[in-house]
Amino acid sequence: MAQIETRVASIVIPDANEGGDIFVPIQQKVVEMFVDEFGGATMYDCFGFWSKSQRMISCSKIDVAIDTLPETVARFMDIVKWVANECGVHSVMAVKPDGVVVFVEGDLYDGTKNI
């Protein structure tokens, strides 16, 4: 019988965009979604640096322990895609439970990074 592994997946969400839109309510919603879908979440303050921005970007990293079943990973990625659409940023960085880093494009994506 195959063993189902549990691993950490994460998403990094900026606190605000350059236009001043605040994403804290989206961060809070993601924590709620992770708790409802996967049983819990841990959120950390962090800073991001990006070549297209001249500033240090205040962010939150949200970790969640999920199993590695394809349908569970797909649900995690659905939430990441929802965040990218809600934030309207260039892209949102996430780490899937297999360790693969993905950048999910948002409304400001300009086609310059292969996603």
Image (cartoon, helix red, strand yellow):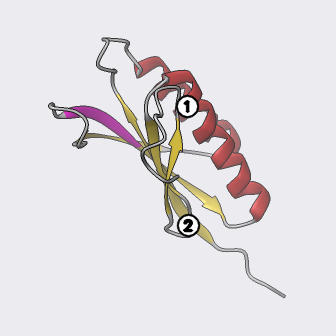
- 74 in relation to 60, above or below: below
Q: Nearer the viewer, residue 40 or 28?
A: 28
Magenta stretch bounds: 57-61
Residue carrying label 1: 83
- 90 in relation to 65, above or below: above
Q: Is residue 64 within the magenta segment?
A: no
User: Which residue in the rendered view is the most extreme toward the top?
Assistant: 20
Residue carrying label 2: 7
Image quarter hosting the N terminus: bottom right
Real-space Cα separation, disc 1 to disc 2, in angstroms: 21 Å
The percent coordinates of residue 40 (x first, y second) are 56, 45
Q: Is residue 60 within the magenta segment?
A: yes
- Mark 1 Cα within 10 Å, few/some/many (few <14, many 20+)? many
Q: Nearer the viewer, residue 97 or 114?
A: 114
Label drawn at residue 74: none
Residue 35 position by quadrant:
top right
What's the residue at 30%, 11% (across, down)? 20
Comes first in the chain, label 1 or label 2: 2
What's the residue at 56%, 22% (across, down)? 86
- Mark 2 Cα within 10 Å, few/some/many (few <14, many 20+)? some
